[in-house]
Amino acid sequence: MATIFTKIINGEIPSYKIAEDEHCYAFLDIFPLAKGHTLVVPKMEVDYIFDLPNDIYAHLNLFAKNVSHAIEKAVPCERIGTAVIGLEVPHTHIHLIPINSVDDINFSRPKLKLSEVEFEEIATQIKNNL
């Protein structure tokens, strides 16, 4: 059965898409820790990041790097924090989170509640910086 991320990639579930290429897809997290919190996933449905083939693993990280630079230009922050936890959804994903302190990447913190308009504005700002 396809993961929720595969359904997003295939357009079965809507997303605030940031970027896409033949191997990767980036979209805003709908339960963000910060404005601009983005998920980067490989299109290949692999649960554990270190089980990805080397070429896809390398490409995923370079893709995430490019997206992170666009987020940094769009969202005021000290830097982009990254997290790969991999327990929530059985599909490799990298969290890119604008941070100003270590506490900003604490997943036990309450998530932001943004409107559809806010998500669309943030997605547009990030895409404009790619």
Image (cartoon, grey):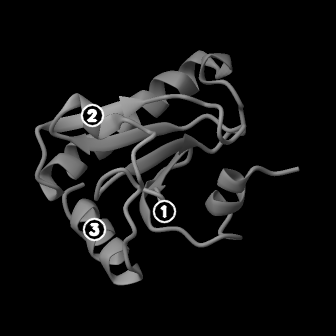
Between the residue at mark 2 and the residue at mark 1, the CA separation in whole angstroms equals: 20 Å
For label 1, the residue is 30
Q: In screen coordinates, is 46 left or right of 50?
A: right
Nearer to us: label 2 or label 3: 2
Res 31 seen here? yes
Under tag 2, what secondary structure? helix
Q: Earlier in the sequence, mark 2 or mark 1?
A: 1
Q: Which residue lies most toward the bottom here?
A: 117
Q: Residue 46 lies in what quarter of the image?
A: top right
Between the residue at mark 1 and the residue at mark 3, the CA separation in whole angstroms equals: 12 Å
For label 2, the residue is 103
Q: Residue 63 lies in what quarter of the image?
A: top left
Q: Are marks 2 and 1 in contact (CB under 8 Å)?
A: no
Q: Where in the figure is residue 95, as x and y percent of width and height?
A: 43, 40
- The amino acid marked with disc number 1 is Ile
Residue 129 higher or lower than 83, as above or below: below
Assess disc 1: are there few (<14), some (14-19) or many (≥20) residues with their C-alpha within 10 Å of its C-alpha: some
- The amino acid marked with disc number 2 is Asp
Q: Are marks 2 and 3 in contact (CB under 8 Å)?
A: no
Q: Earlier in the sequence, mark 2 or mark 3?
A: 2
Residue 45 higher or lower than 119, as above or below: above
- Residue at 13% across, 45% down: 77
- Residue at 17% across, 56% down: 75
- The amino acid marked with disc number 3 is Ile
Identify the mark at residue 122; answer none if there is no mark.
3
Under tag 3, what secondary structure? helix
Q: Where in the figure is residue 90, as x and y percent of width and height?
A: 72, 37
